[in-house]
Amino acid sequence: MKYLHLIWAALFRRKTRTVFTLLSVLAAFLLFGMLDAVRTAFTAPPSAAGVSRLFVGSRVSIIQSLPQSLLPQIQALPGVDEVTYANWFGGYYQDPKNVNVMFQIAIGPQYLDMHPEFVLPPAQRKAFDETRAGAVIGDTAARALGIKVGDRIPIRGSIFTNKDSGETTWTFDIVGIFKAAEEKQRGFENQLLFRWDYFDEGRAFGEGTVGWYIVRVSDPGESEKVAAAIDALSANSDHETSSQTEQAANLAFMKQIGDIGLIVGAIMAAVFFTLILLTGNTMAQAVRERIPELAVLKTLGFTNRSVLGLVLAESVLLVVLGGAIGLALAQVMLPGLNAASGGRVNFPPIGASTWLLGLALMVGIGLVVGVLPALRGMRLRIVDALAGR
Amino acid sequence: MTAQVEIRNVSKVYERGNQKLEVLHSIDLDVEQQDFIALMGPSGSGKTTLLNLIGGLDSPTAGTLTVSGQRIDNLGESALARWRAATVGFIFQFYNLLPMLSAQKNVELPLLLTRLSAAQRRRNAAIALELVGLSDRASHKPTELSGGQQQRVAIARAIVSDPALLVCDEPTGDLDRHSAEEVLTLLQQLNRQHGKTIIMVTHDPKAAEYASHVVHLDKGTLVEQVERQA
Ligand SMILES: Nc1ncnc2c1ncn2[C@@H]1O[C@H](COP(=O)(O)OP(=O)(O)OP(=O)(O)O)[C@@H](O)[C@H]1O
Ligand SMILES: [Mg+2]
C-alpha cells in the first residue's frame, strides 16, 4: 500500500492519455454490465412452479378467448390438481403512454395461490379477497406510476365497456402491492391483477369466456400427458386449445430469439480483444517513456521483481479503475433504462455474480495488458537505461 | 584499517555482437573511509563504467570489488539491489528525480524499501531536505525547481537512508558556476562533517579541487594518483 502513491503518480503522468484509456475501459465495462443484464434477463431459469403449470390458450390466436364451460371438464381430468383462468384487460392508467408500464389482468379465484412467485403480505391478500373492486399491483409498476395502497385508480380500457358506467373506464381499489419472489422474476412486477367476478359481472360483452386457463398438474412428469388430454377436450371444435408447460413456452420463446448467451459472449469477446490491444499499447508506451525512471528506482535498490510488480499493479489499477466506474454506471443506468422504456424492457439489476465476473475480467485484462511492459521494466539494465541506450 | 572501497584487478568488457570492447583494464584502487575522490579523465575513458561498478549497478568481467567489507562482484541481482539500498547513495548529472513526485516524496523513495513507518519516512526526508537547505521547497515538483535545487533534492535522496558511500557522476556537469559551488560545498560538508566517503566523476578541475584526492583514468587505465592538500 505504501507504493500506491508511486503507482498512482505513474498512472497519471500523462493525464490525457490515461483519461482516454480509462474512458475506453469504462465504455467496455459499461457495455459488459448492460449485456450481462440482457443475458440474465433472457436466460433466467424457469421457476419451479413453471414446470408443473400448464398454459392453456387458443390454438388459433392468443387473442381468441376460450369458453368457460371447459373449466369443469379440465378439472375432471386425471392428473389435474388445480385450475384457474385469466383475461387480458388492455387498458392504461392516466396516459396512453403508460400502456406498457402496467399490464392489467383479470384473474380467477385460485390464481394467486397457484403463482407463489407473486409475494403479497397476508393482510393485503385478505383485503383482496374481501374487496370486490380490489386490485393488487407489482412493485415496479407501483413505483413507476406512483400508486400506493389505498389509492382508488381509474383504468381506461380499450376493449371492455363497463355495464354500469357505459364507459370503458374501470375503477379499482388498490389493496396490495406484490413483489417477485426472486430478483430475476422482476419482470412480473409490471402487472395489475384484479378480481374475476368484478370483471365478469361488469363487462358488457364476452361473458362466459376466459382468455386462457392455467392448470397445475399433480405430477410434473405427467404434464405432457395432461396437456394432450386437455387439448383433446376441444379437438375439432371452434375453440381448439394448445397446452404447454410454462417452461416449454419459455424455452420455445428463447429458441426464437437465438442463443443470447452466445451472442453476448461473442460481442464481449470482440470488445475485450479490442480493449486489450488498446490498453496494451498505452501501457507499452507508458513504460517505454518511463524506462529511465524505472532505472532510477532500481538504482535506489528496487529489485527486478518489485519493478515487475509496480508495472503490473499500474496496469491492473488502470483497468479496475475504469472498469469499476463503467460497471457502476451500468448499475445506475439500468433502472433508468427500464423506466425510460416504459416497462417494455425490464432488466434485472446487476448482481454480485456480475460484479465478481467483472472484477475477475478487470484483473485478468490488467495482468494480460501489463505483462509485456512489466517484463520489459524488469529486464532493463540499469547502466544502459541511465545512459539512454 | 581496511579501505572503504577495494578494487583488485578489475576489468570490464562490453560485447556487441561478436565485437569485444575492453573498457577497463585491470584496475587496482583503494578508497579509504571518509575520503573524497575526484575521478577525472577524457570522455570515453571509462569513468562512468568504473563508478557504476563501485556503486553495484553493474558487475565486472574480472577482478574483485569489496565495498564496506562486502564482496559485491559476485552478488546476484536482488542481493545487489538490497546492498545498494543500504550502502550507496547515487547522484547523477541530470538529477534523475521522478517528475510526478514532490521533492519530499522523491526523497522518501529509498525509505520505501525500509521498515520505517510513514511518519518516520516523512520525518527523515524532512531532515534530509533541511540538511540541503530546501525545507521550504518540500512540496514542489522537480519542474518547479532550478537545476541546482533539483541536484540538492537528489543529494537529499542519496543521503536519506544514511549510506556510507556516495557516488556522483558529474554532479555539477549541468549547473552554472554558482549552483555548482553550492553543490560542491554541500558534498564537502557531507564528507567532512558527516563522514561520507565520496567518489565523484568530473571534467571540471575547479570541481576536483573540492576533493582530497584526484584519480586519473585514461583509456581504461589508472594513470596517476595526485595527492592534494585540501
Ligand atoms: N553498455 C555498453 N556497451 C558498449 N559499450 C559501452 C557500454 N557502456 C560504455 N561503453 C563504452 O565504454 C567506453 C567508456 O564509457 P564510459 O561511459 O565509462 O566513459 P566516460 O569516461 O564516463 O565518458 P564521459 O566522460 O563521456 O561520460 C566508451 O567507449 C563507451 O562507448
Ligand atoms: Mg561518463
Image (cartoon, rainbow, N blue to C red):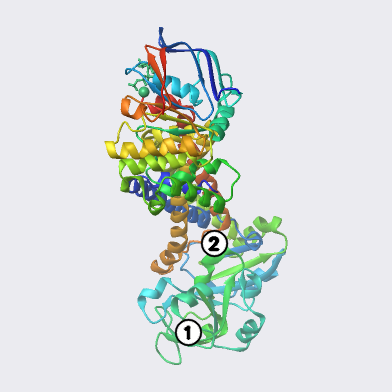
| Residue lying at 32% horizontally and 25% vertically, measured from the top left | B205
Q: Residues within 10 Å of mark 1 (few under 14, many from 20)?
A: some
Question: Please, is residue B79 above or below residue A58 in the view?
Answer: above
Which quadrant of the view contains residue A99?
bottom left
Query: Looking at the image, can residue B219 be seen?
Result: yes
Label 2 packing within 10 angstroms: few (<14), some (14-19), many (20+): few
Cβ(mark 2) to ligand 1 < 8 Å? no
Q: Secondary structure at mark 1?
A: loop
Quadrant in the picture for residue A231: bottom right
- Give the residue displayed 39% in from the left and 88% down from the top: A167
Q: Chain of mark 2?
A: A
- Residue A288 or residue B70, whichever sits in front: B70
Taking A283 as reference, is B54 above or below it? above
Which of the marked residues, 2 or 1, is nearer the chain's N terminus?
Answer: 1
Q: Which residue is mark 2?
A: A236
The residue pinned by badge 1 equals A203
Confirm whether circles 2 and 1 share one chain: yes
Percent x, y of residue A235: 57, 61
Residue type at tag 2: Asn
